Image (tube, grey):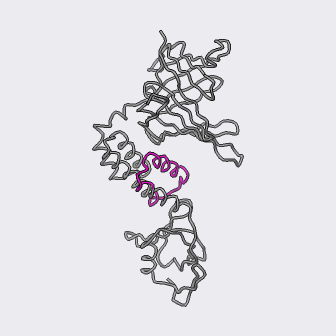
Amino acid sequence: MERDGDRAGRRGLRLPIISSLALMLLITGGRARADKVLLRSGEEVVAHLEWSDAEETYCLILEDGSERRVAVEDVVTILEESSLPLLDSLENLERRVSQGQDDEVFDKITDFRTQYPKSGERVRGRLAAMLRALGARRLEGGNTDKAWEAYYAALQILPGDKKALLKIEELRPQAGRAHNLTARSYFPIQEGARWVYQLDGVDRLVRIISVKAELKGVIEAVVEEGPEMPGPANRKKYRIVLDSDGLWRIDSRRKRLLGEPIQVGTRWTEQEPLVLRTWEYVAIGERVKLGDKTYSDCLKVKITTTAVPLPVDPVIVYRYYARGVGLIKTEWDLGTMEELIDYRIEK
């Protein structure tokens, strides 16, 4: 550090340069904050400083969540206190976890990881710790499947997380069925299967009219879709194919509806003209209530559509697939919702 003759202002005050030990205590002893840090090179960096005992260096957590390590002597001083939205978001999530807002915060943690894909080990470690806390609370409540899901999500965010890995191995005998789930678990391909969905009072029919098995376990179905009442003339047909990579809809183009493996964090993208779509599994074992019926084992899929290269906010859609039933609900971020009102197998 520089001598005491070098000074910097914090919140308008002129403060003397402090020792590295005092600085360490300052930045680790209270509520996490960000600072504008002056480095010996003359560079000014907005970051949250944390001390690394193992390496005896400072770890700078930057605005995008990435990390940068610098030697003690390379940190000259803190110029001023600054804001870091990433830190505020992390602390808000931790508060919600401590308050027991489990189901709501689970999605928020997943969204945070997507929002800050460059996050370093320290940020990911805090996210994983939150997920482990959710897992422990779910386990206390007797929900083994959802506990396993939380620990698995922690391992996805922080690969090598020994605490999460130990719990996953411990719970595997009870929650091991999650490993046996496939796309077919959430979309029964059977001739005569029919679904009726309602959106703003309008009913839409989806019906499988024929099924055939191909080589190597591939299953192909012909599907009819359109208004329920007017009749076949107003309905279109397309194919549904189930293979080792998932469930596909094939009409004028081939689009993957469900991918493999069925586990939280599985994602895939598809590029269309001026549009990029990303699918991601964000929850397994969700409970969804529609009218007087509750589906207790649902797969939640988040679909994010981004206009490329237009500077507009992405559109987010959630789809819920019930095990053994298929798609039961589609939820748009604009507030509209299409839901299943009838499912049956016709003879």
Q: Tell me which segment is drawn in magenta.
A: 96-123
Q: Position of residue 136 (x, y in %)?
A: 33, 49
Q: Position of residue 116 (x, y in %)?
A: 54, 54
Q: Main secondary structure of the magenta part?
A: helix
Q: Is residue 228 left or right of residue 218?
A: right
Q: Position of residue 135 (x, y in %)?
A: 36, 48
Is 60 drawn above or below residue 184 in the view shown? below
Of residue 335 and residue 62, the one placed in the foreground of this image is 335
Is 100 drawn above or below residue 208 in the view shown? below
Verify whether residue 6 appears in magenta: no
User: Residue drawn at (59%, 26%), measured in percent from left and top?
Assistant: 198
Is 302 drawn above or below residue 221 in the view shown? below
Of residue 83 and residue 97, the one placed in the foreground of this image is 97
Looking at the rendering, which quadrant does residue 28 occupy? bottom left
Residue at the far bottom: name it.
5
User: Residue drawn at (53%, 49%), measured in percent from left and top?
Assistant: 114
Q: Position of residue 13 (x, y in %)?
A: 58, 84
